[in-house]
Amino acid sequence: MVFDVPVMVKSLSELNNIIRENPYAESGINITQLHLTFLKSIQKNKDVLILPKMIKQEDEFVIRNSVVYIRCFGKYHQSKLTNDFFEKKLKVEATTRNWKTILKLSELAQSI
C-alpha cells in the first residue's frame, strides 16, 4: 500500500520567526492552550477575511502569512478550529501542531 503524504518543510530561521510572532505566547499563558496550523499556501481572498466571523466560540486565532496561531480555552479536540476546518474553509492543505511540539522542533533543529 502506498500513501501520498504531504510534507511542509520550514528552515530553523523560519521556525524561529514563527515562534517570535505568536501573538498568544505571552508570559503566564498555559502553553497547552496554544496550537499552530501551517498552511501550504494562503490566498488573500474573501475567505480569509470572513473566517473570523464564522466562528462563534471563545477560542481565538490569528492568520499571519501561511500560519494560523490558535489559542484554545478548552481542549483542542473540542475546538472548532481544527486542521480540517481550516483546510475546508481556505481550500488549502494544512497541518497542526501543539505549541510544545513547535518549541521542541526548534530546540532539536538548533542542536543539529
Image (cartoon, helix red, strand yellow):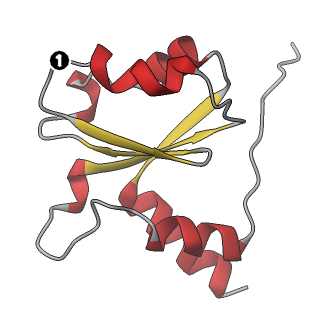
Residue 81 horizontal side relative to residue 36, left or right: left
State the residue in front, 110 or 18.
18
Quarter of image, res 60: top left
Q: Which residue is mark 1?
A: 56
82 vs 17: above or below? above
Q: Secondary structure at mark 1?
A: loop
- Quadrant showing the N terminus: top right
- Indicate the position of residue 17 as horizontal and vertical percent values: 57, 72
State the residue in front, 107 or 61.
61
Q: Residues within 10 Å of mark 1 (few under 14, many from 20)?
A: few
Which residue is found at the position 15% from the left and 61% from the top? Answer: 30
- Quadrant showing the C terminus: bottom right
Q: Amino acid at mark 1?
A: Lys
How many marks the image carries: the answer is: 1
Which residue is found at the position 61% from the left and 31% from the top? Answer: 94
- Indicate the position of residue 62 as horizontal and vertical percent values: 38, 44
57 vs 97: above or below? above
Which residue is found at the position 72% from the left and 60% from the top? Answer: 10
63 vs 13: above or below? above
Residue 98 horizontal side relative to residue 64, left or right: left
Which residue is found at the position 74% from the left and 45% from the top? Answer: 8
Residue that lies at the very extreme toward the right in this rendered image: 2
Quarter of image, res 66: top right
- Indicate the position of residue 59 as horizontal and vertical percent values: 19, 34
Residue 45 horizontal side relative to residue 56, left or right: right
- Indicate the position of residue 53 as horizontal and vertical percent values: 29, 19
Residue that lies at the very extreme toward the bottom in this rendered image: 111
